[in-house]
């Protein structure tokens, strides 16, 4: 009974809001001048960002610096978590050794399904990121979808399988740095051409072989895709270190 | 032809709703983890894959929908993916629970344990 009282209060509040307050807010019937500007200019107009997707145009061109700082906040978070779990070179090598109780991952059924699903995830995430200038989605969303693939491999096979096939933490960090560097370089290119930072300048081709590529937007999306996917992969690899191994490291540090 | 597809799709969606209801009931009422996992899989296969295919048939059979082939294709592909992933996920959960010996149960037959002991 006591549990029902908060529930009833919440329900009553929601219904009261819906019935009494919502009709009093006058709905917006016209597009505001700012919205109209973006809708008209994002693809046609004089200030074109070469993309029919207005959200992507705003994200990576009109309000590009905002997105740049958002990206840097995300990377500070990744760097912060990597610092929390930092290991020296000897410990890193030891973390790559298989533990005794490791029995080779999950069963054959799961491994085969994982192979198919991982291939699908790679294709879908690349499509989300590289069509970012045409459809909803973009670099960050594509990168987050990409990061699911190594996570699935870690769950079904093990982190050792990922490391043996060449994607260890250092490689992931290098990929992430390439992505970040790419974003920074593409952002600086318009300055050489008398433009503003992160402006979509005609230096970047808007069409390649008859396909709309949206000038610099596709480069931003691709590098963000790479950086986000690799950043998440690095964190997942660290989190996949077995607890017993990590506790061993901690105990050794305490003893010294 | 279109009408038949439409009705098959609608019936499959209704079957999906019933399967979801039974899956939810079983998830709440069944005695231990493995049997509850069976109820959850009834919920995902019967309650997600079947209605997804149903939506595909329904979209194919309706003349009034714009982009009906896109809707049908997307729902068929999603259905196949769920059809692949859901049994593997349930299998992984059951395998992990059996390996960790976390569930208290009184099985009449436990083939996996017999195989383990023979190894």
Image (spheres, coloured by chain):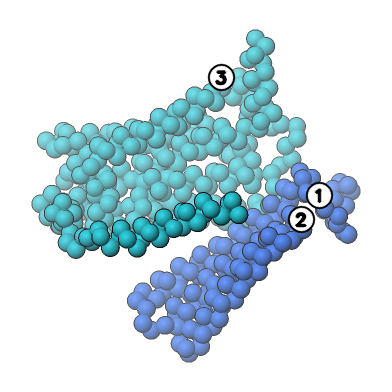
Chain colours: A cyan, B blue
Q: Earlier in the sequence, mark 2 or mark 1?
A: 2
Name the residue at the top extreme. Answer: A256
Query: What is the spatial separation of the Cα atoms under label 3 and label 1, in whole angstroms?
Result: 42 Å
The C terminus of chain A lies in quadrant: top right
Q: Secondary structure at mark 1?
A: loop
Task: Using the rendered image, report if marks 3 and 1 lie on a common chain.
Answer: no
Q: For the residues labelled 2 and 1, say whether their Cβ atoms are less than 8 Å apart.
A: yes
Task: Using the rendered image, report if marks 3 and 2 lie on a common chain.
Answer: no
Residue A88's mark? 3
Q: Position of residue A249 (x, y in %)?
A: 64, 21
User: Relative to residue B112, is residue A174 depicted above or below?
Assistant: above
Q: Nearer the viewer, residue A189 or A208?
A: A189
Q: For the residues labelled 3 and 2, say whether their Cβ atoms are less than 8 Å apart.
A: no
Task: Tell me which residue sits at (22%, 33%) in the image.
Answer: A188
Residue B32's mark? 2
Residue B104's mark? 1
- From the viewer's perspective, tell me whether residue A42 is left or right of residue A2: left
The N terminus of chain A lies in quadrant: bottom right
């Amino acid at each position: 009974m006591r549990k029902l009282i908060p529930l009833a209060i919440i329900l009553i509040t929601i219904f009261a809001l819906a019935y009494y307050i919502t009709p009093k807010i006058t709905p917006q019937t016209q597009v505001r001048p700012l919205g109209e500007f973006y809708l008209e200019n994002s693809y046609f107009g004089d200030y074109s960002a070469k993309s029919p997707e207005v959200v992507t145009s705003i994200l990576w061109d009109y309000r590009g610096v905002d997105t740049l700082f958002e990206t840097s906040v995300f990377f500070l978070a990744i760097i912060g978590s990597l610092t929390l779990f930092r290991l020296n070179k000897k410990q890193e090598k030891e973390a790559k050794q298989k533990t005794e109780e490791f029995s080779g991952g999950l069963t054959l059924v799961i491994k085969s399904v994982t192979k198919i699903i991982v291939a699908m995830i790679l294709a879908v995430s690349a499509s989300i990121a590289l069509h970012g200038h045409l459809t909803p989605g973009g670099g960050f969303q594509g990168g987050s979808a990409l990061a699911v693939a190594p996570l699935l491999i870690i769950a079904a096979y093990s982190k050792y399988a990922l490391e043996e096939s060449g994607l260890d933490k250092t490689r992931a960090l290098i990929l992430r740095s390439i992505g970040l560097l790419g974003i920074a370089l593409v952002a600086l290119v318009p300055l050489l051409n008398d433009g503003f930072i992160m402006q979509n300048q005609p230096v970047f081709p808007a069409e390649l072989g008859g396909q709309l590529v949206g000038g610099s937007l596709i480069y931003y999306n691709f590098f963000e895709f790479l950086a986000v996917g690799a950043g998440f992969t690095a964190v997942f690899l660290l989190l996949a270190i077995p607890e017993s191994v990590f506790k061993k490291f901690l105990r050794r540090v305490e003893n010294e | 032809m279109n009408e038949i597809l439409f009705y098959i799709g609608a019936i499959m969606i209704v079957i999906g709703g019933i399967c979801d209801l039974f899956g939810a009931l079983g998830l709440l009422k069944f005695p231990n983890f493995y049997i509850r996992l069976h109820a959850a899989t009834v919920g995902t296969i019967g309650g997600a894959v079947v209605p997804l295919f149903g939506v595909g048939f329904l979209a194919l059979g309706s003349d009034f929908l714009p982009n009906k082939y896109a809707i049908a294709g997307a729902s068929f592909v999603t259905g196949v993916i769920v059809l692949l992933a859901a049994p593997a996920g349930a299998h992984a959960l059951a395998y992990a629970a059996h390996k960790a010996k976390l569930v208290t149960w009184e099985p009449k037959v436990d083939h996996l344990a017999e195989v383990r002991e023979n190894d």
